[in-house]
Amino acid sequence: MAVVPGIFYSDASVSNESHAFIFVTLNGQQQHYYRFNVDQFSYAKANEEYYIQVGNNRFTKHGVSLDLYPQSNDDADLILRGNLTFTNPSPWPVSLFQLGAMGPVGWMPGLECTHGILSFDHELSGNLSLATSITSTRSSSSSTSDATTSSLPLEISMDGGRGYTEKDFGRSFPSLWVWIQTNSFRENPGTSLFVSLARIPTPFFGLEFPGFTAAIWHRGELIPFATWSGAAFDDIRISKEEVYIAMRSARRRGKRSKNYRVEISVDRRNVPEVLLYAPVNFTKMEPFVWEALRATVHLRLFDDNGNIIIDDMGDYAGLEVHGNVQYLVDNLCGKKTANKLVCL
């Protein structure tokens, strides 16, 4: 299950579609999109502890409280209520010069969006109640009316589950990207993988470049692989059956320095996808991004001597492959088609 709160501000000169929202994805197959007025959205100030409030729904680093039921203008039929508590969160550290997942690139002007990891992995406790809202039409000789009922609720205990929290904010999504995430590894509970690749435009004479940020959280250690950290790709292949990525971290010398190589293979075969809402031309939110939440990832992490640190399968993986991602493949360093200034 994925639960995403947010707010969309449209260009007031061409659209009045500004609204807050929450969307819920179940089993990687069903999406439910709930709309709220802008004034029903609030968030933490710079000097406050993180929270987002949308209507009666509250999201904090300590947990979530949900009270969702569909209204007439919602693209949803799910009634979702409950409270979850998060323990032992593992955020990507943020400092003045290292803006978490974005690193120093986060300060670059003109970025379409900025990404952050609030928790690679945390433990869950609490309960959720799920039911389906059912609308039926009643007609009489003088009028027609709709009556709303619901199915019997399904009560689910989330005790012992694991969660992950990330955020995005900005003016639009990139024109193309690949996103991978899972913290459901069979032999390594608590280990988490995050990968994001995209075409990044700049405000400088229309220049653009392929960029990536990725990390593995394993046994309390953060292992970054990113453009800004000096990491590089050995290989990247993207097809309808598989996404394959091989990367190596920046070479560092010294007794305490650690160097890594990672191989990531995502099986896309027979994986259900759901169409998610996303911003379109600053005018409205529309469903146009396909996302899977039930892909399978084979992760292999090696140390500098080629010894295997992790060789594991991650289930319930999130996967998005959007736009002309051949651009990313063509920009592998060493290829004739690669960007001469910045390549993967």
Image (tube, grey):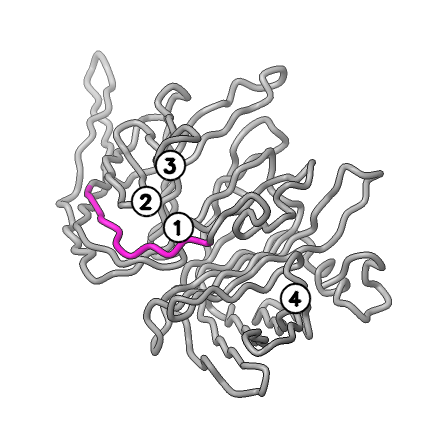
At 57% from the left and 71% from the top, the residue drawn is: 242
Q: Which residue is mark 2?
A: 61
Inter-mark Cα distance, 3 to 4: 35 Å
C-alpha separation, residue under disc 3 versus residue under disc 2: 17 Å
The disc, 3 or 4, on the residue closer to the chain's N-terminal end is 3
Asked whether the beta carbons under mark 2 and mark 1 sit within 8 Å of each other, the answer is yes
Residue 317, quarter of the rendered image = bottom left
Based on the picture, tell me whether residue 91 belongs to the magenta stretch.
yes
> SS at mark 2?
loop
Q: Which residue is mark 4?
A: 231
What range is drawn magenta here? 82-92
Q: Is residue 144 left or right of residue 332?
A: left
Residue type, label 3:
Ile
Quarter of image, res 264? bottom right
Q: Position of residue 72 (x, y in %)?
A: 33, 26
Q: Earlier in the sequence, mark 2 or mark 1?
A: 2
Please name the residue that numbered disc 1 is placed on: 165
Amino acid type indicated by mark 4: Ala
Query: As rendered, which of 317 and 112 lies closer to the eye?
Result: 112
- 211 left or right of 34? right
Label 2 vs label 1: CA separation? 9 Å
Mark 3 crowdedness (10 Å alpha carbons): few <14, some 14-19, many ≥20: some
- Reading the image, the residue beneath label 3 is 22
Q: Amino acid at mark 2?
A: Lys
Q: Earlier in the sequence, mark 3 or mark 2?
A: 3
Residue at x 53%, y 46% (from the top left corner): 115
